[in-house]
Amino acid sequence: MIALLAATPILAITGGSSAQHVISLATAVMVAVITRGPETQIASAAQLLKQFLLIFLLPVVWMTLQIFPMSSLANPIWSATSIALNQPSLPGRISVDPGATLQSLFLYLVNVSLLVSTVVITRDRRTAETILYVLSAVTTLISVEFLLSQLDSFAGFIPQTGAATNLFPAAAALAMLINGALVARAVERHLHQQDIRNLASPQLWVGVFWGLLGITVALAALMALEQHTLVAVTGCGLMVLVFIAAVRRLGFRFWPSALLFSGLAAIASAMVVPHSLSGGLGLLGFVSLPPEAITPAKHLLSDAPTWGNGLGTFRLTSIAYREFGAALADPPSTAVLMAVEAGRLASAILAAFAAQFFLVSFRGAVRRGRDSFFAAAAAAVVVVALCESFLDSSLSNPTIQAIVAVMVGVGLAQSVGRTSGADRSAE
């Protein structure tokens, strides 16, 4: 796993299918190693993950339905536009490109396997700490790569991609959260010492310094990317870390803390969402792109059926809506991508699933006696990832998906102590 994470800065530069191949190969090796590990460790992780069984299986069922012949559920609009797609006889399936949907299913299974493998591996606290440090290093290094690319001496250092599709905004946001978790770790470890009044502790200040340095680098990358909305969203993610630390310090239990957080989140949503939707663009109202860049997505979104057009088919279906001679359209955001490819209902279901991941991580962070920063970081990552999915499509990048899967896996693995058993996680 460390080798996979260490390779992510290189994958950020190369991108493309090479990242998918490397992640798939590394995940396969991890699964093979884990299956030969201690049965007690696997059983503990299985007990912890069984509450997410429906979450893991429903997307598989959804994509399988899109692949198999089901003429009654297929979008009738494609029978009239098959020539534009260069496929004179489209199959009677929900997906207009079953091969692309099958590939999306495979990549989804890879990400699930990576998350599950992470949970098994990082049940050990020291391993979890090592992975957290590696995540901090690689996400910060990706931000450094982008900052270097802005210098004339390093022009062309990274591939030039659209603002909505490159992975650097998401990587910088994740770097801020993970480095924030390292600051929380340093403070928490200091508070658990016998002499907490000793502010000269080198472990405290070294941890705080490196965490703040990583946050500063990532913030500089976000500002250079002109991702001001994402800066605000990431700030909310950091506030999740602060909120969890505060309720733990005050001795609040899980449910009062969850209700208080829900109230604050509802207030924030009531202030932001109506403003973003005031233009009548729906999901596209959250995107900061020129109108001509979102026109194909706007038409695709309005014509998207309940069951979607098939995972992995956005670029193919956008051909029918682009102007003559124009380049293939990129999805303006991950939320729009999911609504077009999987249907609006699937997007709502995935948001509900994200809420469950958040609640489990949040509960673990509030209840744990120590090492709460793992689960707190996972909860913050889920919040920021969900919000960023409405802003751009960087979360559709396989490298970012791998980083998110590992961070969430670490948080879930450490949401309960090894001595507390898995029963507590099912409460």
Image: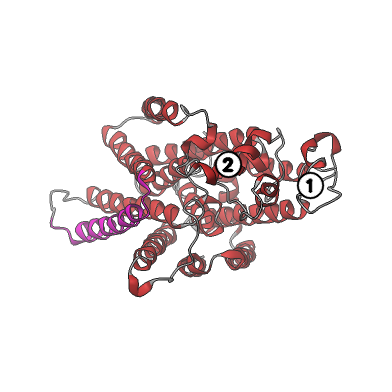
- What range is drawn magenta here? 200-228
Q: For numbered disc 1, what is the local secondary structure?
A: helix
The crowding category of the residue bearing disc 1, from other C-alpha atoms within 10 Å (few below 14, some 14 to 19, many at least 20), is many
The crowding category of the residue bearing disc 2, from other C-alpha atoms within 10 Å (few below 14, some 14 to 19, many at least 20), is some
What's the residue at 64%, 48% (across, down)?
A: 323
In the picture of the structure, the residue carrying the numbered disc 1 is 67
Q: Can you tell which quarter of the image residue 327 is in? A: bottom right
The amino acid on which the numbered mark 2 sits, given as a three-letter code, is Thr
The residues tagged by marks 2 and 1 sit, at their Cα atoms, a distance apart of 28 Å
Viewer-proximal residue among 157 and 410: 157
Kindly report which numbered mark, 2 or 1, lies closer to the viewer in this rendering: 2
Percent position (x, y) of residue 317? 70, 47
Q: What secondary structure prevails in the magenta region?
A: helix
State the mark number for residue 203: none
Percent position (x, y) of residue 272? 40, 30
Looking at the image, what colour scheme do you see? secondary structure
Q: For numbered disc 2, what is the local secondary structure?
A: helix
**Left or right: where does residue 68 sit relative to residue 155?**
right
Furthest toward the bottom, the residue is 153
Percent position (x, y) of residue 143? 37, 61
In the picture of the structure, the residue carrying the numbered disc 2 is 295
**Left or right: where does residue 98 sit relative to residue 221?**
right
Could one spot residue 52 in this view of the protein?
no
Mark closer to the chain start, 2 or 1: 1
**Would you say residue 149 sits in the magenta stretch?**
no
Percent position (x, y) of residue 34? 60, 62
Q: Can you tell which quarter of the image residue 127 is in? A: bottom left
Q: 136 above or below 310?
A: below
What's the residue at 82%, 45% (across, down)?
A: 68
The amino acid on which the numbered mark 1 sits, given as a three-letter code, is Ile
Could one spot residue 315 in this view of the protein?
yes
What's the residue at 31%, 34% (across, down)?
A: 247
